[in-house]
Each structure stands twice: as structure tokens, then as C-alpha cells.
């Protein structure tokens, strides 16, 4: 297994967290992982992305230039990274906020209305978790429960009450993938 | 084995604390701000001291003070900030102050940018400050290796009474990887009878003077000779290098830090195409592992070596000195923080193969 992912969106949409949770869950399941954030003079509303690798073997270069999966939460991210995806790879599009379609015909595309589902769950902040669930539904590289373990570690026991909502979000996202 | 997903900057800071570092002085600059941020929270927990100084110059001079008093002390910065510290680093070398300086390199020259770069190779390896001195320079290529090198960095600083530089880059500082940190709640520190810890006029110990000013020519000569002799021992004992797939290789890649990881990926890509390529990765940039570089490149099977770096031909000079004309050494590098890809490196090797 070698997953090379790019998660991208607006600052504040939780794209760095999606990547971190995936990397942490991969580590907890004994895989080799790496996480690289974009960083710069950026701000809320600016663009953010991270590269996440998961592998059964030692990761030599952690730099992702040709992702096997691209997860985009906003339109500029899709426009920026669409051409980079390897043929046969996957693109996950947040169709709530992205009003264009993927032009490529040699990749698998999944349109997930993340913000709408999040609104149904009563909390717009879990849009990223819905998307992460969709990604996991396709990639099946780590278990959803492991992602929740990683999230709990990050939140701390005091915020453990947020876990059920996040579990539901991940499951709703995964259910979008048939 | 308990693994934790940690950012490079945070891991290096924690590893320093586990190595007995109890004093940290620094001034903010991207991309290494996570180090002082982490230290500001952790130092009080271990009874240490974190201080954000008014400038880089002040920070390195605080390092001079704490190191001179015998403490394990560290400062960190990124390229332009490290330039500002050079006067103090030269002073620490002359006054024989053990200390650790972390440079998370960013693009230069000048203020450059804030992305990863390797443009400070000459500065770290060839002096940086004025005068005849060296700092020991470690160039880790993963977060785990950075963490593993920290105790060694402090030990070497103490043993040889010298500044030690950890030369990493913004990518290693900002990325996260699983790391295993060895807990060491009571690090054993070496005796430092030379340290300036307070003079007792009735005691037997002579007054400790940690100075870098020797007005009399003969006095300075004694210091420089002493440093020179020490540097010879360091060159004999402290070189570190990784040889990856070098035996009977057709080409030898030479790279350090993040770029070495890209080169490992290139070695694998080329291997899949039946081209045997090896990588020589200096872990100490000073002392430079010249013999290992030479022996790998000068093998009968080798057609040429290729130096790959995120700078404009800096590592290249030491590789060429080491290979000493026995094989051609080509250069592939970009300044301005463009990280070469494994595919580009592989392509270049294929081009050299056709030539």
C-alpha cells in the first residue's frame, strides 16, 4: 500500500486536521506515515493544503507531487491540483462549495456535499470529517474507529463528548461512496 | 515502542530537553517558531529557563553566558536570524563554549522566503563568523534522526567545548512523522571544572575566565593551536555518513537532509528500471566524511557522481574536493526553495547514462 494524498481548501476548513488525523491513525495501525503542511504568510480564508503519505514500507521522500488521491474543499484548490493527480487516481470534491466539475476523464471523481450534510448534522464544522469519511470509504487505508482514537487524543478527554458527532460525520461521508 | 506523531520543531525541542538542555534563548522567525513556542511551555515544567530575547544577537550572547556557566543551552533560528548570530557563534567558538544552535534553513540570500532551502551550507560548514574556527554540523534527514542526534549534539559540544549546529530545513521543521522519543528524566551531565560558576577568593580553584579577546599575539596563538588540535581529533572521531545502495553502483548521488530523501526515492525509481544507483549522505557536514564520499564515487563500477542540493553548488565543492578528480562530479540544484523531485533526479541520471 502506498497512498499519496493532498488535502486542500480554505484556511479554517480543517484541511490540515484531516491530514493529521489520517497520518496519526495510520501510525496507530502500524503504518509508516508523513504529513507536510503548506505554510506561508497565510490567514483564515487563504488557501491551505497538506500532503499525507501512508505506506507499508519506509517512506523515502515525503514530498507528494503526483497524488494518488486529491481531496478539495474549495474551488481554487481543485483548479490548482486537478492536473497533478496520477491517472487512475481519485478526486474528492466538496460539491457544496465547488460549482465546477472535474475536467479529467482518467480519474475517479466523487462529489460530496460536505457542508450540506454537516448542516443536516447540525454543525457546519464537521464538513471536513464528512469528507475524510468519504476518502476513507474509498481508500479503506485505516479504520474509522482509529481516526476517532486519533481525534480523541488530539481533543483530550474533556472534549470527548464531540466524538459521537464526529463518528456520525465520518460514517455519513463513508456512506456517500458506493 | 511508543510512537508519537510530532512536528519536527516540537520533536527537536523535546529531544533537547531529554538531553538535559535547560536553557533556551531565541527570537522568533518562520519556519522554526514552533521550537520557541514548545520551549516556552516545556522549560518551566522541567525547571528550566525559556527566554524570548530582544534580538538574535542578544539570544546568542545569552547562550554564551549560560554555556559558560556550564549549563546545557540551545538557541534556534532560521537563515537570516542565524546570520545575525554569527558574531556570537565565533565568540563561543573562541571562548570554547559548548552550545547547540538549530538552523531551520529557509530561502536566501537576504530575507529570501520562508520555504525550505539548503543555502546556508557554506555559512555553517565553512565558518560563518570570522576567524579560524569550526562548528560541528549535523544534517538530519528525518524527524527521528533529528531526535536521535540531539543527545549526541550536546555530548559532542561538551566533550570538545565547541558550538554544534543542527542544520535542518523548513520542511523538516514543519512536517510531522511518527517519532520515538527516549525519556531521560535525569540526564547525567559531564563535569565542567572550567565553567564560570562563581569565584571563591578563599578557594583553591582559579578564577574562570571565558574570553575571546587575546591582545598578545602569543596568547592568541596558543588558543588557535589548541582549537586546531581539537578540530583534528573531531575530524578523526566524529564523522558520520550513510551509504545507501552504493556497492557496485553505476552512479553515485550525493545529498544531505531533505534532498537525500528525494534521492532515495530516485534510487528506487532507477532500480525499478534496472539502473543501479547509490546514495552517499553526509550526516556530519563538518567534519565532512570525505573518505566515504571518495571511496563510494571512486569505485570501478561508477561512471560519475551527481550532487543534488537545494542551493547553487555549495555541497558540490566538498564533494569535488573529496572525489579529487577521480570521477566526474555533476551538479543538480536549485536555489529559491524549489525541491527537486525524484523523477527529475532519475531523469538526470538517465541523461548522464546516455551521454
Image (cartoon, grey):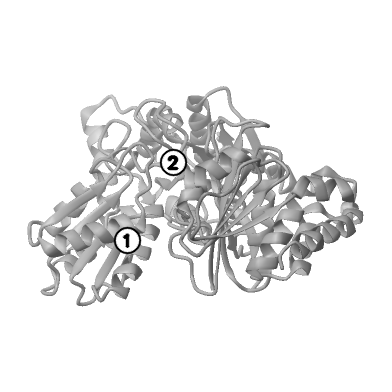
Marking on residue B97: 2
Q: Are marks 1 and 2 on the same chain?
A: yes
In the displayed structure, B53 sits above or below B132; it is above
Location of residue A135 by image quarter: bottom right
10 Å crowding of disc 2: few (<14), some (14-19), many (20+): many
Residue named by callout 1: B281
**Towards the viewer: A20 or B143:** A20
**Could you say where residue A94 lies in the image, as x and y percent from the top left?**
68, 48
Tell which subunit mark 2 falls on: B
Chain letter of the residue carrying label 1: B
| Residue at screen point 20% across, 54% down | B319
Which image quadrant is residue B128 in? Answer: top left
First-in-chain label (1 vs 2): 2
| Residue that lies at the very extreme toward the left in this rendered image | B325
Task: Give the x, y percent position of residue B108.
Answer: 36, 32
Quadrant of the drawing holding the C terminus of chain B = bottom left
User: In the figure, is residue A126 to the left or right of A72?
Assistant: right
Amino acid at each position: 500500500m502506498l497512498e499519496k494524498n493532498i488535502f486542500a481548501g480554505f484556511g479554517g476548513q480543517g484541511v490540515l486536521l484531516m491530514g493529521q488525523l489520517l497520518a496519526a491513525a495510520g501510525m496507530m495501525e502500524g503504518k509508516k506515515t508523513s504529513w507536510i503542511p503548506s505554510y506561508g504568510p497565510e490567514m483564515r480564508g487563504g488557501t491551505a493544503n497538506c500532503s499525507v503519505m501512508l505506506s507499508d514500507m519506509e517512506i523515502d521522500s515525503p514530498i507528494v507531487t503526483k497524488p494518488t488521491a486529491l481531496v478539495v474543499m474549495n474551488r481554487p484548490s481543485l483548479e490548482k491540483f486537478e492536473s497533478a493527480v496520477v491517472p487512475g487516481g481519485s478526486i474528492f470534491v466538496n460539491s457544496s462549495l465547488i460549482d465546477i466539475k472535474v475536467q479529467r476523464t482518467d480519474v475517479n471523481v466523487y462529489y460530496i456535499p460536505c457542508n450540506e450534510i454537516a448542516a443536516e448534522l447540525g454543525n457546519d464544522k464537521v464538513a471536513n470529517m464528512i469528507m475524510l469519511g468519504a476518502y476513507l470509504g474509498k481508500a479503506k487505508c485505516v479504520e474509522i474507529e482509529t481516526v476517532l482514537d486519533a481525534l480523541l487524543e488530539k481533543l483530550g478527554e474533556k472534549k470527548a463528548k464531540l466524538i459521537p458527532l464526529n463518528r456520525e460525520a465520518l460514517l455519513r461521508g463513508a456512506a456517500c461512496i458506493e | 515502542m511508543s510512537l508519537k506523531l510530532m512536528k519536527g520543531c516540537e520533536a527537536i525541542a523535546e529531544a533537547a530537553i531529554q538531553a538535559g538542555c535547560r536553557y533556551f534563548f531565541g527570537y522568533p522567525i518562520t519556519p522554526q517558531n514552533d521550537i520557541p513556542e514548545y520551549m516556552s511551555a516545556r522549560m518551566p515544567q522541567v525547571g528550566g529557563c525559556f527566554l524570548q530575547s530582544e534580538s538574535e544577537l542578544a539570544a546568542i550572547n545569552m547562550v554564551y553566558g549560560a554555556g559558560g556557566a556550564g549549563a546545557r543551552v540551545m538557541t534556534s533560528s532560521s537563515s537570516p536570524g542565524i546570520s545575525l548570530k554569527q558574531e556570537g557563534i565565533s565568540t563561543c567558538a573562541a571562548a570554547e563554549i559548548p552550545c547547540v544552535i538549530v538552523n531551520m534553513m529557509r530561502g536566501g540570500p537576504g530575507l529570501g522566503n520562508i520555504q525550505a532551502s539548503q543555502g546556508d551550507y557554506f555559512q555553517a560548514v565553512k565558518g560563518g563568523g570570522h576567524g579560524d574556527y569550526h562548528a560541528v554540523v549535523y544534517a538530519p534527514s528525518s524527524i527521528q534522526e533529528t531526535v536521535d542526534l540531539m543527545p549526541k549534539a550536546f555530548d559532542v559540544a561538551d566533550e570538545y567545548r565547541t558550538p554544534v549546529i543542527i542544520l535542518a530545513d523548513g520542511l523538516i521543521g514543519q512536517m510531522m512523522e511518527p517519532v520515538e522519543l527516549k525519556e531521560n528524566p535525569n540526564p547525567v551531565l559531564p563535569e565542567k571544572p572550567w565553567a564560570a560558576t562563581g569565584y571563591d577568593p578563599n578557594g583553591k580553584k582559579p578564577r574562570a575566565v571565558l574570553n575571546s579577546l587575546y591582545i598578545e599575539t602569543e596568547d592568541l596563538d596558543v588558543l588557535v593551536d589548541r582549537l586546531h588540535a581539537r578540530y583534528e581529533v573531531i575530524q578523526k572521531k566524529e564523522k558520520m555518513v550513510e551509504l545507501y545502495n552504493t556497492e557496485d553502483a553505476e552512479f553515485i548521488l550525493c545529498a544531505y537532509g531533505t534532498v537525500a530523501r528525494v534521492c532515495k526515492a530516485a534510487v528506487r525509481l532507477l532500480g525499478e528500471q534496472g539502473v543501479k544507483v547509490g546514495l552517499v549522505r553526509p550526516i556530519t557536514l563538518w567534519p565532512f566524511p570525505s573518505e566515504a564520499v571518495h571511496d563510494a564515487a571512486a569505485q570501478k563500477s561508477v561512471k560519475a557522481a551527481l550532487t543534488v542540493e537545494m542551493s547553487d553548488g555549495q555541497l558540490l565543492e566538498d564533494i569535488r574536493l573529496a572525489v579529487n578528480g577521480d570521477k566526474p562530479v555533476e551538479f543538480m540544484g536549485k536555489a529559491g526553495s524549489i525541491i527537486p523531485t525524484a523523477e527529475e533526479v532519475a531523469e538526470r541520471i538517465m541523461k548522464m547514462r546516455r551521454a
